[in-house]
Image: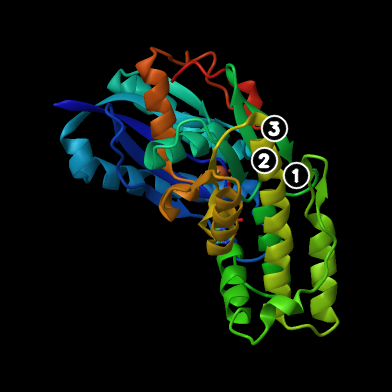
Amino acid sequence: MGGVVLGIESTAHTLSFGMVDLDGNVSDSYSNLFRPKEGGIHPREAADHHCSQVSNLLNEVTKSEMFKENDVEAIAFSQGPGLGPCLRVGASVARTLSKSWNIPLIGVNHCIAHIEIGRNQTGCIDPVLLYVSGGNTQVIAKSRDKYRVMGETLDIGIGNMLDKFARNQGLPFPGGPKIEELAIEFTKVADYQNKLIDLPYGVQGMDMGFSGMLTAAQRRVLAGDSLESVSWSLQEHAFASCIEVAERAMAHTGKTELLLGGGVACNSRIRKMAEIMCEERGATAYWPEKKFCIDNGTMIAELGRLLHNVGFKTSLEDSSINPMLRTDHTKVIWD
Ligand code: ATP
Ligand code: FE2
């Protein structure tokens, strides 16, 4: 029998389990997404959702071929950043499984897991990462023993901005994919490229901001511009901000790979922009499949595997969650 690391993700709206074997081969994730009936995500409600789904999902995982054919060698969980009540669910389940299966517990940094699953899936080695999710928007590059944040949003995450815009237009969560559909519709309009609605652009130095463009976009809808045209213009502005900062990070560091990660990296337009920017500077753009861009348990298992390989374990005393954990708080002790 071979061995696998089991990963648990529960930072926000997604509860998910996944596995990676000791050679780095990945399983699909077993996930359940909390969708609020109205408004944004309420941490307590999301945590209740996760509690109610844990045993079903765990049952599914234990019935999978990969689980049955392997020993579970370690259990990894998202220690932070994220919503406290949600993180606590994953951490409690991980502690329980670690104790009852008598295997090491490994607390991992969720942001870094987005990077490591991307490296696992695409084969890129030392990329600049454009991490674009609901709560996070960061341009990251590794230097010595840390993934350093070179630039980030100064207000809200890009995904939360898209979700909020969508919600205000009566579209359900998650709004990002729906905005993408509306934007694609607009690209069928004749001469659409010359119909960009001017919104406040969100780059300051190496940092970004999205709340100004959100407010302006909402005003344009109220003023009568079509939802399709505003969705397209909003995407163009938001994604161009991220790609601009990512390009500058590549220029400063001399790195020649760009890796996209986080839920917004599912978007075909940001992928295209990344590709164009990289082509223009002789670099290469990478992204994992959609199922590994959004939050998933497999990415937690992958970072768990890398840590397990170098003998890292989290003691019970050190296993408290850390909702404010940052990308650059974690020392990179693996290859
Ligand atoms: P994190 O904790 O890392 O901030 P998260 O909890 O926001 O992550 P993810 O699953 O990484 O979760 O990202 C979810 C976000 O991705 C949502 O805001 C959603 O609207 C957005 N998203 C998903 N698909 C698309 C898409 N095709 N286009 C734009 N945004 C998308
Ligand atoms: Fe995430």
- Which callout, 1 or 3, points at the residue further toward the start of the chain? 1
Quick one: 279 or 44, which is closer to the camera? 279
Does the residue at mark 3 contact the one at mark 2 (Cβ under 8 Å)? no
Residue 268 shows up from this direction: yes
- Quarter of the image where one finds residue 331: top right
Does the residue at mark 1 contact the one at mark 2 (Cβ under 8 Å)? yes
- Which callout, 1 or 2, points at the residue further toward the start of the chain? 2
* Relative to 89, 217 lies left or right: right
**SS of the residue under disc 1:** loop
Quick one: 193 or 55, which is closer to the camera? 193
**SS of the residue under disc 3:** helix
Image quadrant where one finds the N terminus = top left
Residue 166 placed where, x, y %? 67, 69
Vertical relation: 204 (above or below) 269: above
Residue at mark 3: 252
Residue 225 placed where, x, y %? 78, 83
Residue at mark 2: 138
Q: Residues within 10 Å of mark 2 (few under 14, many from 20)?
A: many
* Relative to 290, 270 lies left or right: right
Name the colour scheme.
rainbow
Q: Which residue shows up at 65% across the image and 25% down it?
A: 328
Residue at mark 1: 153
Vertical relation: 112 (above or below) 215: above
Instruction: Measure the alpha-carbon separation of dots 1 and 3.
Output: 19 Å
Instruction: Measure the alpha-carbon separation of dots 3 and 2.
Output: 16 Å
* Relative to 203, 116 lies left or right: left
Q: Which residue shows up at 63% across the image and 86% down it?
A: 189
Amino acid type assigned to the residue bearing label 2 in the image: Gln
Vertical relation: 288 (above or below) 119: below
